[in-house]
Amino acid sequence: MKNEMPHSLSGQRLMEMYELLFERFGPQHWWPGETELEIAIGAVLAQNTSWKNVEKAIENLKRKELLSVPALESCDFAALAEEVRPAGYYNLKAKRLKNLIHLVAEEFRGDLGVMFKENPRAIRERLLSVNGIGRETADSILLYAAGMPFFVVDGYTHRILFRHGMVEEQCTYEDLQSLFMDNLPEDPKLYNEFHALVVRTGKDLCRRIPKCEICPLRDWGPTSPVAG
DNA sequence: CACCAGGCAAGTA
DNA sequence: TACTTGCATGGT
């Protein structure tokens, strides 16, 4: 039984959850990037890293005029690594950016707009085949840069839904993504705002001790990390 | 000092 | 399949 059919109990609570979060925090104005490329680059740089550090790296890239496909494709690896250094894992991320840019340059004429005209599922698989692009990064690019209806799942999504007894602790990325996508309207704007609100909420939830007095979801059942 | 942040891939068993 | 580990800066 591959649970979580559409209209599961947890699924039916999602829209209410969204409304509570939106009432509490308001619009989050995501993704905070100006171009498709900037958003895609930011998605890679943001892997397990605070957004503040990502901003510094992106600002470096802008200042060095490296925020274009041709510039990123041709620039020296060590120079790129130095610019993305504030975002952490800089050697790893410089390589991952090169991998992503290589895909766009070689298969889509260096144009993300061209890539985004292809079949969404096919593009997702193509992105996932790039070393350094996992499911969250791929979905972030597809939702926030391309405007495609893929719900982005992250650590906060899992933590919040598990703490409120809506999923099993060992549930997969696909389980969580399906819960949202099978129970909400297929609306990129809704997915955009909802994920941003999940992150905003997660920032107020300590890893060990939930600050339930300020959590809009405090009345939503269990809030202990051990579900007790 | 410890712990965390808008993950992912590679290695091991 | 299911763990574990390396990657790294910057803020609290």
Image (cartoon, coloured by chain):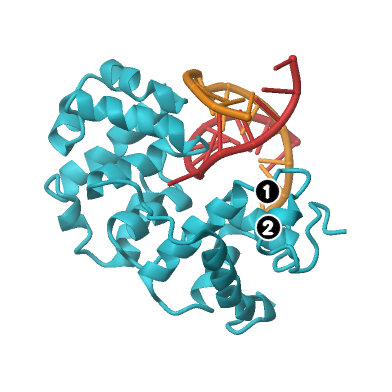
Chain colours: A cyan, B red, C orange
Where does the image place residue A85, in percent across and percent down from the top left? 39, 21
Which disc number belongs to residue A214? none
Q: Nearer the viewer, mark 2 or mark 1?
A: 2
In the displayed orientation, state which residue is furthest to the right. A228
Of B13 and A134, which appears nearest the observer? Answer: A134
Precedes in sequence: disc 2 or disc 1: 1
Chain under label 2?
A: A
Which disc number belongs to residue A215? 2
Where does the image place residue A154, in percent across and percent down from the top left? 55, 52
Q: Is residue A88 above or below residue A227?
A: above
SS category of the residue bearing label 1: loop
SS category of the residue bearing label 2: loop
Residue visible at 47% across and 51% down in the picture:
A136
The answer to whether B5 appears left or right of A102 in the picture is: right
Which disc number belongs to residue A205? 1
Tell me the kind of residue under disc 2.
Cys
Instruction: Decide if residue A111 is in sight here.
Output: yes
Chain under label 1?
A: A
* CB within 8 Å, label 2 to label 1: yes
Q: Are marks 2 and 1 on the same chain?
A: yes
Where does the image place residue C4, in percent across and percent down from the top left? 72, 32
Of A103 and A111, which appears nearest the observer? Answer: A111
Residue visible at 70% across and 44% down in the picture:
A206
Q: Quadrant of the C terminus of chain A?
A: bottom right
The answer to whether A13 appears left or right of A49 in the picture is: right
Count numbered badges in the picture.
2
Of A117 and A199, which appears nearest the observer? Answer: A199
Where does the image place residue A87, in percent across and percent down from the top left? 43, 28
Q: Residues within 10 Å of mark 2 (few under 14, many from 20)?
A: some
Tell me the kind of residue under disc 1.
Leu
Q: Residues within 10 Å of mark 1 (few under 14, many from 20)?
A: some
Residue visible at 59% across and 54% down in the picture:
A201
